[in-house]
Amino acid sequence: MKILKIQTLRGPNYWSIRRHKLVIMRLDLEDLAESPSSEIPGFYEGLISTLPSLVEHFCSPGCRGGFLSRVLEGTMMGHIIEHVALELQELAGMPVGFGRTRETATPGTYQVVIEYENEQAGRYAARAAVRLCESVIATGTYPADELQQDLKDLREFAADAALGPSTETLVKEAEARGIPWMELGVRAMIQLGYGVHQKKLQATLSDRTSVLGVELASDKEGTKQILRSAGIPVPRGTVINYLNELQDAIDDLGGYPIVIKPLNGNHGRGITINITEWEQAEAAYDVAKEVSKAVIVERFYEGSDHRVLVINGKVVAVAERIPAHVIGDGKSTISDLIEETNRDSRRGDGHDNVLTKIEVDRTTWQLLDQKGYNLDTVLAEHEVCYLRATANLSTGGIAVDRTDDIHPETVWLAQRVVKIIGLDIAGIDIVTSDISKTLREMDGVIVEVNAAPGFRMHICPSEGIPRNVAEPVVNMLFPPGSPSRVPIVAVTGTNGKTTTTRLIAHIFRQTQQVVGYTTTDGTYIGDYLVEPGDNTGPQSAQLILQDPTVEVAILESARGGILRSGLAFSACDVGVVLNVAADHLGLGDINTIDDMARVKSVVAEAAMPNGYAVLNADDSLVSAMANRASAQIAYFSMNPDNPLIRSHTQRGGLAAVYENGYLSILKGDWTLRIEQAVNVPLTLGGRAPFMIANALAASLAAFAQGVRIEDIRAALVTFQASTEQTPGRMNLFNLGTFHALIDYAHNPHSYEALGGFVKNWTTGERIGVIGGPGDRRDEDFVSLGTLSAQIFDRIIVKEDDDTRGRDRGEVAKWIHQSIEQTRPDVHCEMIFDETTAIQAALDSATPGSLVVILPESVNRAIQLIEARNPVQVVTPTA
Ligand code: ATP
Ligand code: ATP
Ligand code: MG
Ligand code: MG
């Protein structure tokens, strides 16, 4: 077997609208192409002994063992690899269930589609499945250690890409509320929502967390001072810089017990608590000094550590934190007990998991020493032995939920504290022996206020009720009822996507909103070009959706991008499908026009249930997409009597039609006239029918999004097919005695459309300068030739600079032959170089004629015409 290609999809796609995370492997079975599994000796037995859990795959029989019975009966290797790749991920702790396998037009070559949870892991699983099956075929088995290694690697991919525990719960909560999110790839930042509605997070720092608040909280002494002057109980203590100040500081506190800690520290580093004598104090001073220049000397307060989490001014959770410890059983040594405690699967390394493994360090030795213990000491039954002085989860501590126990006065105090410090999300550390009593009663104190507090102790406390502390964060950023998405209008079709996308953008601009849009020409925000280039893939769409100024997104969604990686958004508000025609067939395993319709249908199907699929009622492949869409349907048509339009509007549906010279919206029984086609410059005075169709689609999409008729009208009459607004789309120039038209038509369907306009040219000769892109099929050039012969009186066939893998002259020859066969009377010559061909046509143009140029390079063609000082025709009268 040979892996020809592996692609990763990340959005709604050809295979599934709902399952966005898919890997597609193009696989050549080679010598296995003719061998179903039943004919490979020992394969079935080898497979079940390697992966016995495959018995859980139902597959088409729909029951346990269903897939294995298919293997026994005989199924193709691609299908088996699909199931193996899914199972490998499952075994590595990534549950995935969706897979598909299809033979391509190349016999023996398959597309194997596999769902993934982690992108890298999905690609790896696809490769590993091929390796595993090859080994079972050749040797009847797959070595157990290799399988273990594969699973280990898969788990590592997942762990490497995993978000931190706090971030993870925040994005889950966002998902539950239907708020889109994305990783920004810098500083572990996450974006929630799209465009102008977005909010950013970095773990539990939000984009509204005040820098002043963060800085104040991280200054322990400053925090204590400001809280003390507000009458809030904080530890008594002083800051010293030299060892010779230590004794005075201790005396000021009234003696021992004391705590010594670095002024600027965190995670419990450099802290020694419950110091009861001078030697300890000296040692603790040195330890603290290693972390920070200045050292805090504080009274030691009895009690345990409590973390009070305050979000958006409200106490939302309280956890009591208990330092790492073990409890004796009368038999085991401390060392054994630590080992056993660490076996708990919830304990990972650092912040990886809900709890952290206990590690023996300097403080542990000190604590044991104080009691005269060491690691080999056997603890009495029920004896608690602390291994750390502080309760940080990251040093092996545990957390017990106390949210329901906190005294109301302490709630009030905590809420005041965060307002004084100025934090939207804060964790307050309180030391008290009983959180259900007031601090005064217990002599409790607030030791510290933390910005960016960890959520894991509240989400997964070791004891007590888990608290959904992500909800108040998401509710703070997106108060219920507030928007998180910007409207997305996605446009697809074989022809007219760019023109329609631009027109929709122009319509939305009338509503004074900032419009972000992407086309095959470039990415635009507002009035400016952000980036030129063919920007119809997911990256450009991401750019728009990540832009904090964008209020509406209009995205040209071309076939290539949909096939390569799926749509760049999980759902759109309006999905427009203009037409489906034969173009790009034979590329990307899309061979028939019905396949192509399924590709474009992704855009219609991705429209949200309360949104709209805007479909062409005159194109049966497009109108049929209504059956697959879950959104409401709106149809457009050049014919008001189209039966589909009639029945749809009779049922109260929304439509747009060309009637009596007007572009009109139909809403149930009502006709809302937008404008006469002759007043819409894009339609070249109503003479370019396909442009009327594009304008209807654009108007309908905008209307479905609530844009007023007046705004649509204002846009239609000001949008011009000029070289500035739509370069290469029906740009008509008056060159004195004759006219020239530059257009981008490059497939039979667009030639036909263009023919609809050229036919209406009656003042003189119709001259065509034509060609075709080399990556199309031979039969496509034949139809280009046939169509050109029907449209033009005289033709110059030229070639693209980039022959896309063909020999120079090959494409031209196909087109030329086909013209001669269709209409021998048409004068036809071949000039391969595009510039020479255009100049020749312009030089030989007869009075009253129309020279139609279909260039490879639109800019170059426009320059050639502009050198002849034309008057651009933008509002021709009918
Ligand atoms: P973290 O990053 O975990 O919050 P930190 O380095 O910022 O730790 P503190 O929060 O000041 O340090 O102290 C850590 C822990 O030490 C406290 O949560 C508390 O349990 C204990 N502690 C600190 N100061 C005192 C004190 N004066 N009396 C009693 N215990 C204290
Ligand atoms: P591409 O796939 O190259 O990005 P596109 O779909 O974005 O093309 P446009 O750039 O808007 O399409 O138009 C390209 C050409 O297609 C136009 O110049 C015109 O000749 C033709 N065309 C535009 N709209 C239609 C239509 N509705 N039906 C048929 N042909 C059209
Ligand atoms: Mg602290
Ligand atoms: Mg385009």
Image (spheres, rainbow, N blue to C red):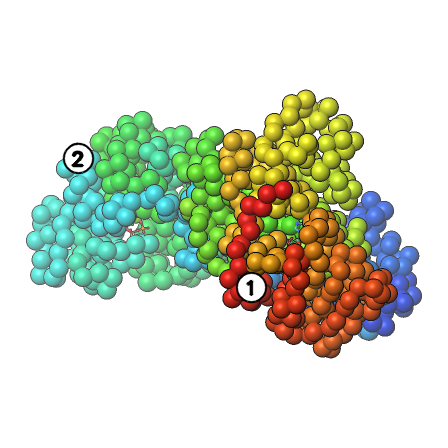
Q: Which mark is residue 865?
A: 1
Q: Helix, strand or loop at disc 2?
A: loop
Q: Is residue 464 visible?
A: no
Classify 97 as above or below 659: below
Task: Please give the name of the residue rendered at 53% of the width and 65% of the height, measured from the top-left corner.
Answer: 868
Q: Is 283 displayed left or right of 70 in the figure? A: left
Q: Amino acid at mark 2?
A: Ala
Spot occupied by residue 156 in the image (x, y as percentages of width and height): 56, 62
Task: Please give the name of the residue rendered at 65% of the width and 23% of the height, measured from the top-left corner.
Answer: 670
Q: Is 258 displayed left or right of 566 in the figure? A: left
Q: Given this view, does label 1 or label 2 mark the residue nearer the observer?
A: 1
Q: CA distance from mark 1 to mark 2?
A: 78 Å
Spot occupied by residue 411 in the image (x, y as percentages of width and height): 31, 30
Q: Which mark is residue 230?
A: 2
Q: Is residue 788 visible?
A: yes
Classify 518 as above or below 686: below
